[in-house]
Image (tube, coloured by chain):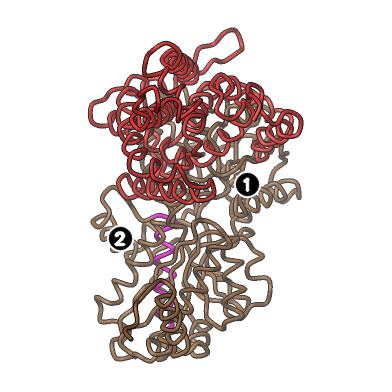
Chain colours: A red, B brown
């Protein structure tokens, strides 16, 4: 699960780092990513492990549109006002999903969903392994994109200093749109990777969203390597934790880590001062 | 001087209008109209149990439509039933708020709410407001143990579930001459899951089973869980003979797949009664792995002509669906209310209450006798059946008088099914 957590948190962290807007619709977007992969599979038979590109593309467009129509207007406002708009977006997404795809959880039988590899007595679950691999791969690609391409540099520049970026001629609004799109695409990929693992339903994203908040805080707000590492840490901690405590208390682990971090290192593992 | 409408004056006016509306009391006007009888239906139609909530709402609605198509409540001049729809979002506090709203809107009776925790909240409210509350589905015993006058329950209680479960398993052990000694129990962490899981464990530990058995592992996980690998590994390590899961639709699929992946050897999966393991989506999504799952649930009676009739209508309205525990009992709930209204000849709470107490509703599509209400509001004739999925179809296998097929036990292991 760690890799997928990383990817979800990466999207959240990217959006927050650049725009200082907390994307409350992140969980709902995850559900949309899952549904798009599911629909692609039903229509064309393409396995979710390959159709994640489709989810990414759709979510990118959706993210871009949301940024230009909603997020861009609320950016100058106080955080508490932004929250209301973003929670509104979340509700629209969740309920649209319920209207379009219905309330029943879908968990289709995919090619790999039941395959396992045995190393001696240790079982390795193929869909989890694939999900992990692809998630890490995508996260690395996003990372390289931000580091080395012009657009990536423009995104980082706008994050560091909006006025400065504007002065040197960056089309900040476009950059923000693309950035929100990438954030949404990350969560879209994460969604399609989850299809073989968990049943898809309109409200599936909520616990993931909460966990990814914890991850972002653990890694440092807006820090991308922080989000990746944080995702891995929380993923491993959650599955190890169930050995020692009842699993109905699973979320305690990620949130106690979050509380500890807030107490002793409020800027997060990789966060700068601020 | 011409007065301009600005934000403040607008607010003032709308507040005044709102206040007069509240005081003059539209609801009272609605109550006085004989043409339409309002019934509040509260189900978890959004949130983590949305699929079940919608099935329940459809069941409620289908019953109301049937009554209306037959000419409404005849003793009241053919008054039509109208459902006021409420959504609990699977949360206690929202369920109570919705009930409050529907009562304000003029509901003469509340039906619902699928979840035991919400049933508790609404029962208290209805007692305070003096509005009859007919529980279609909710199993926790405690709901009817508080001496409330206005609460009635069509559904069997958790203790009925456990008594039946013990008897059915006892019968299986006797007939198939297998030994079930080690039992693992899993349940979800909501009120129903906990109560049901704990009741089953107490039943086993209290030596109430007709054979010797112990609980070797008990695992609880939250509703809407995304990963059960660690939990199933624990089950595997305990080496149980059978697994008794109390599930909800999402986690049921994860659980079965995980049992397959980790190659957990079991004589069978026998649920003490839980949703998730009998819906069409479960069979559609997990295919052959769904076969041989035994489930002790209040089920439809395949031999009842009433069931055949409503099932046909239901599958026509909602292709791919069939009437199950949830839609079936939801249907029954509204039919019981309609029957009481017919005899009460009035929508006054006291008259309706009196009529509900004397209920003897015989056109029951579910396994069990006619619906009657004991002094505490429970239906003593509600019971559960043992169902098994055989070749992708759900068959009632116990009790013998309602059985459609013979059960298969022990079941072939999940990964040996081709």
Q: Is residue B185 visible?
A: yes
Residue at the top extreme, as displayed: A120
The quarter of the displayed image where residue A266 is located: top right
Which tag, 2 or 1, sits closer to the chain's start? 1
Seen in the image, is A268 located left or right of residue A71? right
Work out whether B339 lies above or below A259: below
> In x, y percent, where is residue A116?
49, 16
Question: Which image quadrant: the N terminus of chain A?
Answer: top right
The residue to which callout 2 is attached is B308
| Cα distance between the residues tagged 2 and 1 | 35 Å
Q: Name the main secondary structure of what is drawn in magenta.
A: helix
Crowding around mark 1 (Cα neighbors within 10 Å: few <14, some 14 to 19, many 20+) is many
Residue occupying image coordinates x 28% and y 47%: B320
In this picture, which residue range is highlighted in magenta?
A: B324-340
Which of discs 2 and 1 lies nearer the camera? The answer is: 1
Q: Tag 2: Cα neighbours inside 10 Å, few (<14), some, or many (≥20)?
A: some
Residue that badge 1 annotates: B189
Q: Decide which of A140, B389 is in the foreground and name it.
A: A140
**How many numbered marks are there?**
2
Is B24 a magenta residue?
no
Residue B191 vertical position relative to residue B10 in the rendered view, above or below? above
Q: Position of residue B313 (x, y in %)?
A: 26, 61
Which disc is residue B210 wearing?
none
Chain containing the residue with disc 1: B
Mark 1 secondary-structure assignment: loop
Q: Is residue B339 magenta?
A: yes
> For the point 38% across and 49% down, which residue is it?
A92
Q: Nearer the viewer, residue B379 or A170?
A: A170
Q: Percent position (x, y) of residue B19?
A: 47, 84
């Amino acid at each position: 699960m760690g890799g997928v957590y990383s990817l979800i948190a990466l999207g959240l962290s990217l959006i927050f780092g650049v725009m200082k807007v907390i994307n409350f619709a992140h969980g709902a977007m995850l559900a949309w990513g899952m549904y798009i992969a599911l629909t692609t599979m039903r229509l064309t038979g393409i396995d979710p492990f390959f159709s994640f590109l489709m989810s990414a593309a759709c979510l990118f467009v959706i993210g871009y549109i949301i940024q230009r129509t909603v997020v861009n207007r609320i950016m100058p406002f106080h955080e508490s006002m932004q929250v209301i708009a973003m929670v509104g977006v979340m509700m629209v997404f969740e309920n649209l999903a319920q209207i379009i795809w219905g309330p029943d959880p879908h968990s289709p039988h995919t090619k790999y969903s039941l395959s396992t590899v045995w190393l001696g007595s240790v079982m390795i679950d193929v869909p989890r392994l694939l999900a992990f691999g692809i998630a890490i791969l995508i996260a690395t690609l996003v990372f390289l994109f931000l580091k080395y391409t012009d657009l990536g540099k423009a995104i980082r520049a706008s994050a560091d200093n909006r006025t400065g970026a504007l002065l040197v001629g960056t089309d900040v609004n476009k950059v923000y749109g693309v950035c929100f799109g990438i954030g949404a695409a990350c969560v879209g990929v994460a969604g399609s990777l989850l299809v073989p693992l968990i049943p898809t339903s309109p409200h599936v994203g909520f616990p993931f969203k909460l966990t990814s908040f914890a991850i972002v805080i653990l890694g440092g707000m807006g820090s991308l390597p922080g989000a990746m590492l944080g995702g891995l840490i929380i993923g491993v901690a959650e599955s190890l934790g169930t050995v020692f405590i009842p699993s109905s208390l699973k979320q305690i682990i990620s949130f106690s880590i979050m509380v500890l971090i807030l107490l002793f290192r409020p800027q997060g593992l990789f966060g700068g001062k601020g | 001087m011409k007065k301009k409408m600005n934000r403040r004056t607008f607010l003032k006016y709308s507040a005044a209008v709102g206040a007069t509306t509240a005081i003059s009391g539209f609801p009272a006007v609605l109550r006085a109209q004989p043409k339409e009888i309002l019934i509040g239906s509260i189900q978890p139609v959004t949130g983590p149990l949305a699929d079940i909530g919608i099935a329940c709402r459809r069941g409620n609605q289908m019953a109301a439509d049937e009554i209306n198509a037959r000419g409404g409540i005849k003793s009241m001049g053919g008054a039509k039933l109208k459902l006021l729809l409420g959504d609990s979002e699977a949360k206690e506090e929202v369920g109570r708020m919705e009930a409050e709203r529907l009562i304000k809107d003029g509901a003469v009776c509340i039906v619902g709410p699928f979840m035991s925790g919400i049933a508790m909240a609404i029962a208290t409210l209805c007692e305070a407001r003096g509005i009859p509350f007919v529980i279609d589905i909710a199993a926790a015993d405690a709901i009817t143990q508080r001496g409330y006058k206005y609460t009635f329950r069509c559904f069997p209680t958790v203790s009925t579930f456990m008594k039946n479960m013990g008897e059915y398993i006892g019968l299986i052990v006797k007939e198939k001459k297998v030994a079930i000694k080690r039992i693992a129990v899993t349940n979800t962490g909501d009120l129903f899951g906990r109560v049901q899981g704990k009741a089953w464990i107490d039943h086993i530990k209290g030596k109430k089973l007709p054979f010797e058995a112990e609980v070797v592992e008990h695992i609880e996980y939250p509703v809407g869980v995304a990963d059960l690998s660690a939990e199933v590994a624990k089950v595997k390590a305990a080496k149980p003979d059978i697994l008794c899961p109390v599930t909800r639709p999402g986690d049921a699929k994860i659980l079965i797949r995980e049992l397959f992946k980790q190659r957990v050897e079991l004589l069978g999966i026998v649920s003490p009664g839980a949703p998730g393991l009998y819906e069409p989506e479960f069979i559609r999504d997990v295919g052959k792995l769904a076969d041989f799952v035994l489930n002790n649930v209040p089920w439809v009676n395949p031999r009842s002509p009433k069931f055949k009739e409503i099932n046909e209508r239901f599958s026509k309205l909602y292709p791919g669906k069939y009437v199950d525990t949830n839609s079936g009992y939801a249907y029954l709930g509204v039919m019981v209310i309609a029957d009481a209204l017919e005899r009460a000849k009035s929508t006054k709470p006291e008259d309706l209450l009196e009529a509900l107490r004397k209920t003897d509703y015989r056109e029951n599509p579910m396994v069990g006798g006619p619906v009657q209400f004991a002094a505490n509001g429970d239906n003593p004739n509600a019971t559960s059946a043992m169902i098994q999925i055989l070749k992708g179809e759900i068959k009632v296998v116990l009790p013998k008088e309602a059985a459609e097929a013979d059960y298969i036990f022990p079941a072939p292991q999940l990964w040996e099914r081709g």
